[in-house]
Image (cartoon, helix red, strand yellow):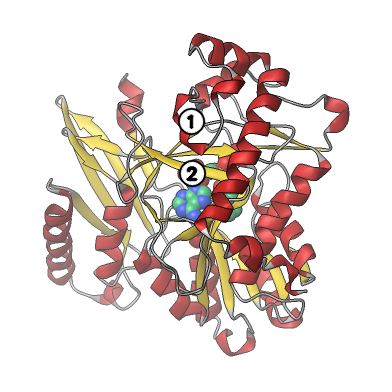
């Protein structure tokens, strides 16, 4: 079962990977040009023909695709294979505007599941493991992706889906789940509940594969402690297949991008200029092996850094840092850029759990920022003056992290709704007035 750790590809030299990427890119550009009139038109407008793209070095000549393109071309406009060749549709949650739908041939599903299998193996998974998948199943890619990956590894797969926390914990105890796959916010909730019920000794978890939303190193430490596991990050997006576009290895210092399937670039989100390795910017992906929905230079809006520093695990594929949140998650408050992850870092460093909400409003034409965070159970019995002292400490810590004032409100334990999927932490009321 060792074959989903594929050292010949995952640990190949840079030259070998580039050779593979060059061949696949040339083929893919032709496939898209010939079969996707929407993108062909974009290439024509940019004055590029497939023959101009001879290697990865020419990638920058191709036009970008954005979420707006996906919406314009909804539902079938970016397909490169006839519907009769497709076997699956997945979709984003589509909280704003139209949903994004992505199509897969059987070949696409196999490659996607293989990427997830690599992620499970990098987290120590084998056919001896019981993989407990609590990502949502259905249109969301989390459940089906990790489920398929777990099958490929040969692990016993528990297709739990999200929700019903009592049943999750019961199965975890009864069936001896060893690897948990869910969002980090749900993992934190499961950890909290398991400890409250005194069941930590009854679970056999050794690792967790958590992604689909931004989470900090502080949150990783909290989850690792509360569940007694090693917590691995996994990244992906529906447009580019789903989870497994990149994943963490034992080094836990960034996620290896599956470079035999996806070419990663970092660009300046304002100018579109490609940035050198090590610089922070927007992540752009080109999928070079997908048949049905092959996006070229897709702007993810996720902000991160790529690095080719040697990894202790032996994998050579480029690593991306944890995304700092999406460029469209970034709040601009009183003209200052604020990432929710900065707030999370301050809260968790202050000994609070990741149960918080960020409320942005506009009062008298000026932005206001309020952070509500749950007290720990010990703090709940503190006097009002002790609590207000703790609030002031948080105000100061947030001020030095963000550079602006944030009102802090310590709220009762368990008063902020727990999430079973992606956590909703930001309430921006300014949108109501525009
Ligand atoms: O969230 C796919 C996925 C499922 C990834 C399960 C990992 C695990 P979408 O719903 O299309 O797909 O959302 C994609 O989620 O552009 C990021 O902004 C964010 N995201 C995904 N993984 C991470 C992560 C899935 N590990 C969007 N860290 C992406 C931070 C993440 N953000």
Q: CA distance from mark 1 to mark 2?
A: 14 Å
| Residue hosting label 2 | 264
Q: Is residue 51 above or below residue 266?
A: above
Give the structural element (helix, strand or loop) at label 1: helix
Instruction: Specify whether 378 is left or right of 188.
Output: left
Give the structural element (helix, strand or loop) at label 2: strand
Residue 299: percent from left, percent from top: 47, 33
Q: Quadrant of residue 246?
A: bottom right
Instruction: Specify whether 179 is left or right of 432.
Output: right
* Residue at 49% over, 73% down: 192
- Nearer the N terminus, badge 1 or badge 2? 1
| Residue hosting label 1 | 58
Query: Cβ of disc 2 within 8 Å of ligand 1?
Result: no
- Quarter the C terminus occupies: top left
* Residue at 54% over, 20% down: 69
Residue 306: percent from left, percent from top: 39, 51
């Amino acid at each position: 079962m060792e074959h989903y750790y594929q050292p010949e590809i995952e640990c190949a030299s840079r030259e070998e990977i580039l050779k593979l990427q060059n061949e696949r890119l040339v083929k893919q550009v032709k496939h898209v040009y010939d079969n996707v009139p929407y993108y062909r038109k974009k290439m024509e407008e940019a004055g590029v023909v497939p023959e101009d793209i001879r290697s990865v070095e020419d990638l920058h000549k191709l036009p970008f695709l954005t979420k707006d393109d996906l919406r314009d071309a909804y539902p079938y406009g970016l397909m490169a294979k006839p519907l009769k060749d497709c076997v699956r549709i997945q979709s984003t949650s589509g909280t704003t505007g139209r949903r994004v739908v992505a199509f897969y041939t059987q070949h696409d599903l196999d490659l996607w599941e293989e990427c997830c299998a690599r992620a499970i193996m990098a987290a120590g998974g084998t056919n001896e493991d019981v993989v407990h998948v609590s990502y949502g199943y259905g249109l969301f890619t989390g459940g089906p992706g990790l489920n398929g990956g777990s099958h490929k590894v040969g692990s016993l797969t528990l297709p739990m889906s999200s929700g019903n926390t009592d049943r999750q914990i019961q199965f975890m105890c009864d069936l001896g789940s060893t690897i948990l796959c869910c969002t980090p916010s749900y993992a934190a909730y499961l950890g909290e509940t398991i400890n409250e019920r005194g069941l930590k000794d009854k679970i056999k978890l050794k690792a967790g594969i958590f992604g689909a939303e931004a989470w900090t190193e502080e949150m990783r430490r909290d989850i690792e402690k509360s569940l007694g596991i090693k917590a691995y990050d996994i990244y992906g997006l529906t447009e580019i297949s789903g989870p497994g576009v990149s994943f963490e290895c034992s080094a836990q210092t960034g996620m290896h991008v599956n470079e035999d399937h996806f070419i990663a670039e970092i660009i300046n989100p304002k100018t579109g200029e490609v940035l050198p390795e090590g610089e922070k910017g927007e992540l752009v992906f080109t999928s070079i092996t997908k048949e049905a929905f092959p996006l070229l230079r897709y702007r993810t809006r996720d902000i991160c850094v790529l690095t080719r520093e040697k990894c202790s695990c032996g994998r050579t594929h480029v690593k991306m840092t944890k995304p700092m949140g999406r460029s469209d998650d970034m709040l601009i408050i009183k003209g200052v850029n604020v990432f929710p992850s900065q707030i999370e870092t301050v809260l968790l460093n202050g000994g609070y759990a990741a149960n918080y909400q960020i409320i942005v409003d506009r009062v008298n034409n000026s932005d206001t920022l309020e952070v509500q965070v749950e007290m720990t159970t010990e703090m709940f019995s503190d006097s009002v003056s002790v609590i207000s002292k703790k609030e002031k400490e948080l105000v100061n810590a947030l001020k030095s992290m963000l550079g602006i004032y944030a009102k802090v409100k310590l709220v009762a334990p368990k008063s902020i709704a727990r999430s079973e999927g992606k956590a909703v932490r930001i309430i921006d009321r300014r949108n109501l007035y525009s």
